[in-house]
């Protein structure tokens, strides 16, 4: 007889509404497509790609391109089908039956799912009321659970709040767990924990091309870590896990990443404008964000969601999620999209 493996039936799938909103501010994507200068190069390269061949088995070319910028070698880098694949793989590689994976809550909802898929015990540790992290509380929870992995998201999704680099160093220095800093939104913040890699062998950094580099369609992310950690996680990745079209595209995007400076600057301007404008509405709290989205709380959130959706604006509704009562996450869009958001919520 066949049946799902134990624990799988109780696992809720990652669910996002598949609605094609005219204004899509629900997935923290870049609101604009990649700059034309990059797209032209990508299309030229894809046109010359031998589609009959498997990709480079170890994605060596992209790994080297990324490593060089950090003063690392290709052996310190893993490339994934989105950073999602990297995060899942590291839970498989360093989690497993009888082990625990600790992470702050609320944070990226997939952490708990990856822990369960790896047969590990998920141990969410509640953030403070203002969504800052109590590092000692997290360390105590990790110690008590003898955690093999601690997952930190900096800046944090869906709150937008940052962990100061010194707090991350304090955590890494005071635990024997593998600490993974998910820097999916790092480009919007500017600060990173990459410089700590040479000092702490229990640290790894995950990054993605899906947000600031506007490459969500291609699915590409990467991990920076010691050779040992990278090699271990590499054991659970499938051969040829990232396709040749994505590898070719990502390499061009990475080499031309300075082209995103204008969109990053616009995001930051618009984020400050939206924080002030939404925060000025009576009864609305906007949490300080260093990302491309805002977490917004209001006692009348249901009415706000209804007004946004009536105008074709998709946002992520967390209002009934643990630790996020009455909260929604609104992506920073183009200036016109943000104007539409403000018109909808103040109507
Ligand atoms: N980490 C965080 C914090 C995220 O918000 C996301 C995407 N929502 C991911 C990882 C996964 O991104 P991707 O798989 O597109 O690289």
Image (cartoon, rainbow, N blue to C red):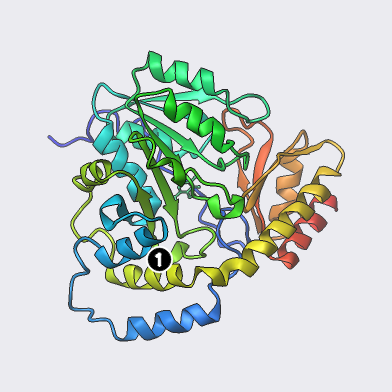
- For label 1, the residue is 218
Horizontally, is 274 left or right of 159 in the view?
Answer: right
Q: Nearer the viewer, residue 307 or 147?
A: 147
Residue at horizontal 37 percent and vertical 35 percent from the top: 200
Horizontally, is 71 left or right of 333 in the view?
Answer: left
x, y percent for residue 153: 50, 39
Residue at horizontal 38 percent and vertical 56 percent from the top: 71
- Furthest residue to the left? 1
The correct choice, above or below, for 219 with respect to 300 in the image is: below
Count of marks overlaid on the render: 1
The answer as to whether callout 1 falls within 8 Å of ligand 1 is no
x, y percent for residue 83: 39, 51
Q: Would residue 310 be seen by someone viewing this image from the given angle?
A: no
x, y percent for residue 218: 40, 65
Looking at the rendered image, the quarter that the N terminus falls into is top left
x, y percent for residue 314: 63, 55
Q: Would residue 99 be seen by someone viewing this image from the given angle?
A: yes
The correct choice, above or below, for 109 with respect to 75 in the image is: above
Q: Nearer the viewer, residue 193 or 101?
A: 193
- Furthest residue to the top? 144
The correct choice, above or below, for 324 with respect to 30 in the image is: above
Residue 79 is drawn in which quadrant? bottom left
- Kind of element beneath mark 1: helix
Q: Residues within 10 Å of mark 1 (few under 14, many from 20)?
A: some
Residue 254 is drawn in which quadrant? bottom left
């Amino acid at each position: 007889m066949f049946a799902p493996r134990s624990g799988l039936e109780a696992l809720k799938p990652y669910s996002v509404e598949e609605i094609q909103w005219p204004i899509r501010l629900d997935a923290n994507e870049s609101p604009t497509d990649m700059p034309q200068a990059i797209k032209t190069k990508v299309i030229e390269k894809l046109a010359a790609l031998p589609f009959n061949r498997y990709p480079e088995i170890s994605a060596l070319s992209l790994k080297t391109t990324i490593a060089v910028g950090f003063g690392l070698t290709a052996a310190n880098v893993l490339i994934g089908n989105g950073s999602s694949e990297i995060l899942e793989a590291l839970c498989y590689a360093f989690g497993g039956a009888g082990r625990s994976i600790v992470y702050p809550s609320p944070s990226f909802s997939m952490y708990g799912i990856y822990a369960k898929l790896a047969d590990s015990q998920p141990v969410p540790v509640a953030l403070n009321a203002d969504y800052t992290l109590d590092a000692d509380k997290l360390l105590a929870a990790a110690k008590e659970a003898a955690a093999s992995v601690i997952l930190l998201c900096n800046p944090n999704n869906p709150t937008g709040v940052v962990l100061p680099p010194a707090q991350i160093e304090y955590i890494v220095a005071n635990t024997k767990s593998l600490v993974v800093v998910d820097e999916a939104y790092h480009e919007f913040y500017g600060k990173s924990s990459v410089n700590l890699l040479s000092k702490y062998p229990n640290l790894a950094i995950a990054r993605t091309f899906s947000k600031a580099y506007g490459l969500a369609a291609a699915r590409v992310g990467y991990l920076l870590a010691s050779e040992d950690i990278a090699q271990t996680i590499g054991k659970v990745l499938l051969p040829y896990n990232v396709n040749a079209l994505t590898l070719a595209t990502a390499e061009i995007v990475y080499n031309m990443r300075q082209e995103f400076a204008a969109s990053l600057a616009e995001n930051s301007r618009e984020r400050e404008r939206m924080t002030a404008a939404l925060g000025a509405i009576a009864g609305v709290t906007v949490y300080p964000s260093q990302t491309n989205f805002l977490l917004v709380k209001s006692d009348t959130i249901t009415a706000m969601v209804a007004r946004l959706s009536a105008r074709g604006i998709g946002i992520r509704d967390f209002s009934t999620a643990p630790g996020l009562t009455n909260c929604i996450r609104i992506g920073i869009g183009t200036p016109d999209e943000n104007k539409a958001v403000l018109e909808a919520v103040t109507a």
